[in-house]
Amino acid sequence: MSESATPDQVVPEGFFDSLEARALSPGWAKKVPQMWPVPRPRFVPAVWRYADARAALDAACAFVSPEQAERRNLIMVNPIADNIYPTCRNLVAAYQLVLPGETARSHRHSPNALRLILDAGADTFTIVNGVQVDVAPGDVVLTPSWHWHGHSNFGSEPAFWIDFLDVPLVQNLECMYFEDHPQRNEPMVSHEPDSPLRHKGVELERGARDAGTLDFASAGLKTIGLQAVGIERAQSRSHDKRIDNNLYTVTRGSVRMTVEELGVVDLVRGDVIAIPCWHAFTIEGLDDWSQLIRVSDEPVMTALGFRELKSA
């Protein structure tokens, strides 16, 4: 009967090199631990200011046109080492500007997307699978996976919004597909001001005032969760560590966020904060009425069963 190896036994010379040459690694001698008792998020809490992004986009108009860029936007890149794209683990957000008279060409992709409209005048719309969907400040417009979509501003005011997509998730799953529309701009075949893809700002505010927290578009995007959150002056809401990743945008009033590892920050309309998984945080209202839109990967964590897990 063979005896088990003991810690003081000598490893044969060249044993580990031989394993590495065959793309094998000894599980008893990992270079870095691959499991741990609780989540260890790589991404960090971070804040982006609408005023900064709007000024930069205004300046970029002098040298960036829709013809030369797929979209005139500014990506909110989480400030961690070697990161060039995601805002948090599974989501990316970007401020976008479409000037009067401009059209951002149509395309489609496997990632799910949505737009939170910050400022826009009349005659600004998105065309999704041939349907013209009008937009107004406070609206959330969905673009589900593999739906054609393009954006137009035929009004007299610049249109600013925030794009949210699950591109980092799709990249990690290695199921990315992208295609430009063969006609550049998708033809409009119908006009639906009350499209189910459009969640009007006035309705979101009404729901948030009535319920405090309103879940919406639950069946619209399989990987992205959406909530309208309302909070009154001096009201406070605390959230323990949680497994999902969250992006909050203030759409009305102002709030104070106290976030683990970040500290205390005040946010106003259009500002965005990333709160990665496993960071406790608190939201406090600073105005008579403030509202936020929460974008998260909660549906993914729920579908995979991870939200219910607890460490012993």
Image: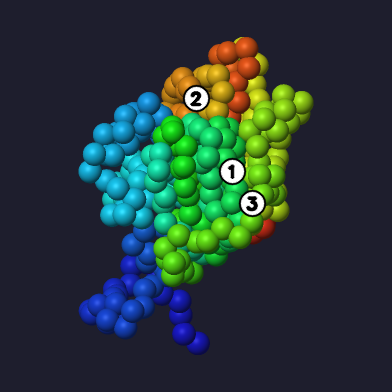
On residue 223, the disc is none
Sequence-earlier tag: 3 or 2: 3
Q: Amino acid at mark 1?
A: Asp
Which of the 4 image quarters holds residue 243?
top right
Instruction: Using a 10 Å C-alpha cutoff, classify the residue at mark 1 as few (fewer than 14 neighbours), some (14 to 19) or many (20 or more).
Output: many
Q: Secondary structure at mark 3?
A: strand
Q: Secondary structure at mark 1?
A: strand
Q: Amino acid at mark 2?
A: Arg
Q: Which residue is mark 1?
A: 134
What residue do we see at 66% from left, 41% from top? 199
In the displayed structure, would residue 119 be above or below residue 73? above
Residue 254 visible to the viewer: yes
Q: Amino acid at mark 3?
A: His
**Label 2 near label 3: C-beta < 8 Å?**
no
The front one of 21 and 215 is 215
Q: Which residue is mark 2?
A: 269
Q: Mark 1 to mark 2: distance in Å? A: 22 Å
Could you tell whether 62 is left or right of 144 in the image? left
The front one of 38 and 88 is 88
The front one of 252 and 84 is 252
Measured from the top left, where is residue 164 in percent x and y? 50, 46
**Label 3 near label 1: C-beta < 8 Å?**
yes
In the displayed structure, would residue 15 be above or below residue 296? below
Q: Which residue is mark 3?
A: 191
What residue do we see at 33% from left, 79% from top? 23
Residue that protrudes farthest toward the bottom in the picture:
1
Could you tell whether 175 is left or right of 202 in the image? left
Q: Secondary structure at mark 2?
A: loop
In the displayed structure, would residue 259 be above or below residue 101? above
Measured from the top left, where is residue 47 in percent x and y? 41, 31
